[in-house]
Image (cartoon, rainbow, N blue to C red):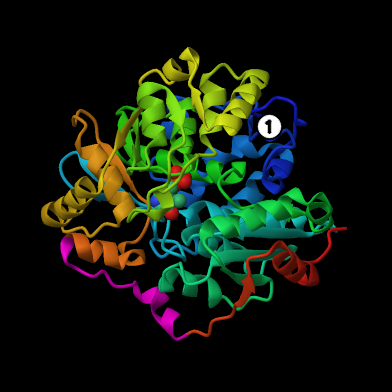
Amino acid sequence: MRYISTRGTAPVIGFRDATLTGLASDGGLYLPEAWPTMSAEAIAGLAGLSYAETAVRVMLPFVGDDLSEDALRDLCEAAYGRFSHAAVTPLVQLSHDQWLLELFHGPTLAFKDVALQLLGLFFERFLTGTDKHLTIVGATSGDTGSAAIDAVANRAGVDIFMLHPAGRVSEVQRRQMTTVSAPNVHNIAIDGDFDTAQALVKAMFNDRAMADRFSLSAVNSINWARLMAQVVYYFYAAVRLGAPERTVAFSVPTGNFGDVFAGYVAARMGLPIARLIVATNVNDILHRALSAGDYSKGRVEQTATPSMDIQVSSNFERLLFDIGGRDGAALASQMRGFEGSGAMRLTNAQSGGHAGLLTSARIDADAMAGAMHWAHDAAGQCIDPHTAIALAAARTTAGDVPMVTLATAHPAKFPDAVERAIGLRPSLPARVGDLFEREERFVTLPATFEAVSGYIAERAVPSA
Ligand SMILES: *Cc1c(COP(=O)(O)O)cnc(C)c1O
């Protein structure tokens, strides 16, 4: 399997390099040269398989010759063996046609574990036996940092430096990062807000000397392997609800467009998906783009769903490329225009190209709270605010096919918002119960390039 950039000029690479590289050298994002397909028979053959075995069947065509089937199976069993539910991503029925797909049974209680647990193992596998060493540098407002740290803690060949804004992440989120005692994990609290931390990380990637000396790498959702791992649970859920004979719809709480793009990939591979609902909060750039062709940045409003408070959705570029005719040169100039002005119109091909598969909805705080109430009253389920955004969107759509809402976080990650909405305070699951007793380890640094890059340069391992 060969991977090409959405902007057309970066080198064509294989799976291993696509996994180890973040952004392509032309500023684009990597994706497969062609979508592998699964026949109805092959999809029917997934019935009854474990999550890990489903993952092997769905991902094998993307991996090409870079991993044998047995090696891929070992990694999937290791990654998904760390989940607290034997089904890994269990389905929960809410009403006769509404379901939740619980994606939060991983170590840090958010769906990002599903992909990052596997990505950490891919990194280790591809670096072992080489003289290459990766230095992952990232900024987090909460969920990504803890999932990434858990995924690479104690993995050979990798160090991770994670910046978080001091005093501006929740205590659970901070402790999930700072109580990991592995020697390759480095937590840095920055005296500043998230945007400042993010800007410092960007400056380090733009410092070519530093980026090359330490092989700086990213773990955000522009990484192809992360998206690939997320395709699996669409198959796993749909098959349990009757695919390939029956079609299924999904509603996805969307921020950076990674999770819902994985659903789009599943559809392109042949999974009969009737509809994918792109559910946004009041930061609705994707809703405006999909419903009216208007992709223009607004100001970010802080909401109870911080993982969806975005201005620009990186992975949307992958969709625009695929449905717009896969013209890298045209997309590169369109994206340059957007980067300059903060606004662009979708082309006719981009607006029409998803042929009714993608719909969108903008859900405000009242509708979100209403969905949390309904889940609790109708089905006894306490759901997190992100999940509630998608459930509210799901409930506005007619119930002709089973509708699956992706439940992306455990409600105990957002106890204040849940309590405000339904008057109940969810408690942390027992397996993270000693989080508040464990010792924390982090440094606080001023928000300057010199302070942070100096700290990293003293501790990171130069790549060979
Ligand atoms: C990251 C995240 C999202 C958004 O997912 P994208 O792939 O960025 O669209 C939604 N909910 C939760 C809880 C998240 O952590």
Q: Amino acid at mark 1?
A: Met
Q: Which residue is found at the position 46% from the left and 36% from the top?
A: 297
Residue holding disc 1: 1
In the foreground, 399 or 457: 457
Mark 1 close to ligand 1, CB under 8 Å: no
Give me the residue at 49% from left, 32% from top: 265
Q: Is residue 36 above or below residue 422?
A: above
10 Å neighbourhood of mark 1: few (<14), some, or many (≥20)? some
Q: Residue 1 lies in what quarter of the image?
A: top right
The answer to which of 431 and 39 lies nearer the viewer is 431
Q: Is 428 one of the magenta-colored residues?
A: yes
Q: Residue furthest right?
A: 464
Tell me which segment is drawn in magenta.
Answer: 422-437
Which quadrant is home to the C terminus? bottom right
Is 325 rendered above or below residue 57? above
Residue 413: % across, % down = 36, 65
- For the question of whether residue 235 can be seen, the reply is yes
Q: Residue at x 62, y 58 (%)?
A: 138
Name the residue at the left extreme.
377
Q: Is residue 6 magenta?
A: no
Q: Residue at x 75, y 26 (%)?
A: 9
Q: Nearer the viewer, residue 297 or 250?
A: 297
**Residue 298 coordinates in the image, percent (x, y):** 43, 38
Q: Is the residue 42 above or below the residue 207 in the image?
A: above
Rendered location of residue 132, percent (x, y): 82, 57
